[in-house]
Amino acid sequence: MIQENPYYQHFLGYTSYTYEPCFDPSLFVYIRRRLGAKILGQINEIFVRRVQEIAEAERSEKERQRKPRSKDRNKENPNQGKLILDATVAPSNIKHPTDLDLLNQSRKITILLHL
């Protein structure tokens, strides 16, 4: 990917785009041999533990989000508004954004931010 992507090459500090491979694919074989089986096993265990921690954190976050809301909240904020069953009718007070409206809003926000 580094050889094919100029953005990767720039990020890695290359002065210009090059088509030549960054390194020989057999480099990783030499690195594994120099580290040895024991150190590679330790590195793998660290990776596995970290992946399990991340998976557990994601599971607990999903569990937290799935918990049903209390009935008290529904009593505090009852549903409001009217249900329109006829699909041909729409309220006339809804503003539909246009390109000019969006540009004008962004212009106003930009002016306010610079004040």
Image: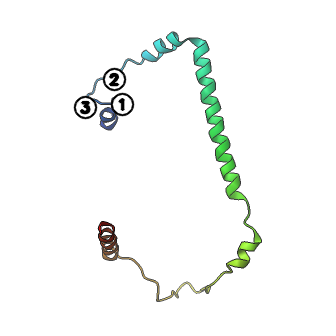
Q: Are marks 1 and 2 in contact (CB under 8 Å)?
A: yes
* Nearer-the-camera pick, 41 or 83: 41
**Does 25 appear above or below 113?**
above
- The residue at 30%/30% (across/down) is 13
> Dividing the image into 4 quarters, which one contains the C terminus?
bottom left
> Dividing the image into 4 quarters, which one contains the N terminus?
top left
Q: Quadrant of residue 18?
A: top left
Is residue 43 shown left or right of residue 16? right
* Nearer-the-camera pick, 12 or 1: 12
Of labels 3 and 1, earlier in sequence is: 1
| Residue 85 place in picture, x, y as percent | 61, 85
Residue assigned mark 2: 22
The label on residue 17 is 3
- The residue at 41%/79% (across/down) is 96
Q: How is the image coloured?
A: rainbow
Residue assigned mark 1: 2
